[in-house]
Amino acid sequence: MKSNIAVPLSDSQPSERIVKRGALLLFRGLRALTEQAAKAPGVIAQATADVKSAWQEAASDPKA
C-alpha cells in the first residue's frame, strides 16, 4: 500500500537559506579580492622602486 506523505524539501526561514548565505559570502569575498587587486599595481611599483634603491645602495657600499 502506497502512502503519500508530503515532506518539506527546504525550510524557507532566513537563517536556513544556505545557498543565499553561501552566495553572499562568495560575492563579498570576490569584491574584497577585486579591491585588493586594484591596489596591486601601486604596491608592485613601490616594491620595484625599493629593490632598485637597495640594489644601488649595495653597489655603492664600500664594504662590499
Image: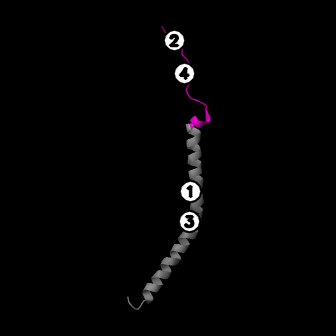
Of the image marks 1 and 2, the number of the one nearer the N terminus: 2
Tell me: residue 29, above or below residue 21: below
Horizontal arrangement in the rendering, residue 61 relative to residue 9 (left or right): left
Residue 40: give its label: 3
The percent coordinates of residue 36 (x first, y second) are 57, 61
Residue at position x 58%, y 29% in the image: 11
**Residue tagged 1:** 33
Quadrant of the rendered structure where residue 9 is?
top right
Secondary structure of the residue carrying tag 2 is loop
How are the colours assigned in the image? one colour
| Residue 7 belongs to magenta span | yes
Of the image marks 3 and 4, the number of the one nearer the N terminus: 4
Between the C-alphas of marks 3 and 4, the distance is 51 Å
In the picture as drawn, the residue positioned furthest to the left comes out as 64
**Residue tagged 4:** 7
The percent coordinates of residue 50 (x first, y second) are 51, 77
The local crowd at label 1, few if under 14, some if 14 to 19, many if 20 or more residues have their Cα within 10 Å, is few
Of the image marks 4 and 1, the number of the one nearer the N terminus: 4
The percent coordinates of residue 63 (x first, y second) are 38, 90
Residue 3: give its label: 2
Of the image marks 2 and 3, the number of the one nearer the N terminus: 2
Residue 62: give its label: none
Secondary structure of the residue carrying tag 3 is helix
Q: Amino acid at mark 4?
A: Val
Quadrant of the rendered structure where residue 34 is?
bottom right
Of the image marks 3 and 1, the number of the one nearer the N terminus: 1
Per the picture, the main secondary structure of the magenta-coloured stretch is: loop
Residue at position x 60%, y 62% in the image: 38
